[in-house]
Amino acid sequence: MRNCKLRMVLCVLFACLIGCLSAQEPTENQAPSNKVTSQERFEREIESIKEEVVARVENTFSEYDTNDDEKLSWDEYREIYLLRAEELKKSIEQLEAQNLEVPEELIIRLRRAESDNPGIPEENERREEFTLMDTDEDEHLTAEELTNYRIEKIDKRLQMRLQQEVDA
């Protein structure tokens, strides 16, 4: 879906660029026959650049957006985050054992791995809500219907929290 939107934007931009250039009138020094050949050459160059950019973007998305993570359950996510945090802790311990300075980046990454733990109930609710909203099935809904759905989810969540506080 991202690839499609990006392609559309690139096509529109290139079409506008070609349209602007083709709308320009020839100067007095240029002969009309020369304009056609240079214009055709320019259009071919634009097309090749456009194809190159689209190919580069597609390669980038295919490298980083594999959708493999969408097949995981929340428990599997949690295990991955915990393993990541453990690996970072081991790396930091090894550096400290060798009396080497621990890079600040490793410490920051460890904090992120610990705080991004998907085992936190509130985060699970937010992720679950986003997952429900981020499907192809909801594309037929209007903005108003999506907003109403989100409001209902938030109301339910607030009612559950209020009930938990009353019970406690």
Image (spheres, grey):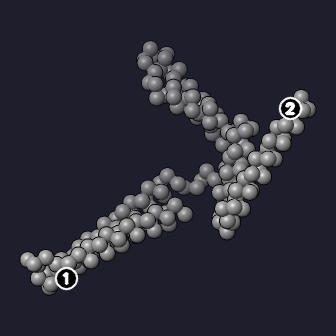
Local crowd size for mark 1, using a 10 Å CA cut-off: few (<14), some (14–19), many (≥20): few
Circle number at residue 71: none
- Which residue is the extreme one toward the left? 29
- What residue do we see at 78% from left, 52% from top? 152
Residue drawn at x 8%, y 77% as measured from the top left: 29
Q: Nearer the viewer, residue 80 or 127?
A: 127
Q: Give x and y (percent) for residue 166.
A: 90, 32
Q: Which residue is mark 2?
A: 165
Q: Residues within 10 Å of mark 2 (few under 14, many from 20)?
A: few
> On the picture, is 165 further left or further right than 72?
right
Q: Earlier in the sequence, mark 1 or mark 2?
A: 1
Q: In whole angstroms, how far apart are the C-alphas of marks 1 and 2?
A: 76 Å
For label 1, the residue is 36
- Identify the image quadrant of residue 23: bottom left
Image position of 77 with respect to 92: above or below: below
| Placement of the N terminus among the 4 image quadrants | bottom right
Q: Nearer the viewer, residue 37 or 74?
A: 37
Quadrant containing the C terminus in the rendered view: top right
Quadrant hosting residue 24: bottom left
Callout 1 secondary element: helix
Q: Is residue 23 above or below residue 93?
A: below
Q: Is residue 32 visible?
A: yes
The residue under label 1 is which amino acid type? Val
Horizontal placement of 68 versus 122: left or right? left
Mark 2: amino acid:
Glu
